[in-house]
Image (cartoon, grey):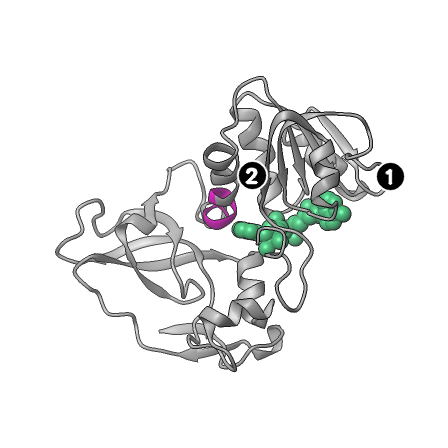
Amino acid sequence: MKAIVRHKYGSSDVLALEDVDVPPLEDDRALVRVHAASVNALDWHLLRGLPYLVRMSEGLRRPKRSSMGVDLSGRVEAVGKNVTQFRPGDAVFGARDGAFAEYVAAKEEKLVLKPANVSFEQAAAVPVAGCTALQALRDKGQVQPGQKVLINGAAGGVGTFAVQLAKAFGADVTATTSPRNVDLVQSIGADRVIDYTREDFTKGGQRFDLILDIGGKRSLFACRRALTRTGTYVIVGGPSGRWIRPMDRAL
Ligand SMILES: NC(=O)c1ccc[n+]([C@@H]2O[C@H](COP(=O)([O-])OP(=O)(O)OC[C@H]3O[C@@H](n4cnc5c(N)ncnc54)[C@H](OP(=O)(O)O)[C@@H]3O)[C@@H](O)[C@H]2O)c1
């Protein structure tokens, strides 16, 4: 099969289209013919091997795996004998290393059925960024209806899911963005939009029950000022650096 691979860390120039083996169908896996795959921040970090912290697991001098891509949608081609949730022909989406290829073999817990009213392209854009936003809001942030929630960095991959999910959970949503994305963020449901180039949310006197920090440029102490006394601060990301950023804030 054809796959997008890389044999060293670098920019998109190191990517190549090569012939590789179709992954073996193990008993607990479904073989999926990939229809669409999406690119997100994770692929960008893994491609460059940056921050260097990434190389602790991915390979110090060169990547251990040549395959690229995680988010995908497609059709089940065959299933291993222990797979119970899917049958050949099912349209699915999910996350599996090596998504930039004609086929992936994924454990069934890594896939779900694709709703018929969602295209393969739309479904492939959801898994990592959508699940990150869901985990951050629901599992870590324990968002409740009526709470005041700030999504800092609302116009990107995680942020656009976070705004829509926070609204679906019944929150009152304030979103930060640069001027070029104000209309976008309003169109997906934000109740208030702060242009971060003109206004610092940590200095406006507003207090939030939950801050989801995706942009991450304000200090933790400044963000604390923008929380209610029992408010929750959830770190998703922030500006990238060579060594550990954006993981530094979480550490
Ligand atoms: N994508 C994922 O699935 C995922 C999963 C886990 C963690 N993360 C981490 O989360 C972070 C964002 O990822 P992403 O995929 O959402 O990236 P993205 O699509 O590039 O979006 C980044 C967002 O940050 C905003 N931003 C830039 N400077 C800002 C500032 N000073 N204040 C507030 N917002 C600012 C940008 O707004 P404008 O475009 O309006 O300038 C943009 O909306 C990264 O650190 C990434 O490593 C991402």
Element under disc 2: helix
**Mark 2 C-beta to ligand 1 under 8 Å:** no
Q: Which mark is residue 198?
A: 1
Q: Residue 161 — which label? A: 2
| 100 to 38, vertically: above or below | below
| Residue 245 on image: x %, y % | 64, 60
Label 1: which secondary element: loop
Q: Predominant secondary structure in magenta?
A: helix
Query: Image quarter for residue 78?
Result: bottom left
Q: Which residues are magenta?
A: 125-131
Asked whether residue 179 is drawn in magenta, I would say: no
Outermost residue, left direction?
Answer: 81
**First in sequence: mark 2 vs mark 1:** 2
Determine whether 58 is above or below 138 in the image.
below
Quadrant location, the N terminus: bottom left
Closer to us: 33 or 53: 53
Name of the residue lying farthest toward the right: 198
Residue 117 placement, left or right of 82:
right
Within-10-Å neighbours for mark 1: few <14, some 14–19, many 20+: few
Query: Residue at horizontal 26%, vertical 51%?
Result: 108
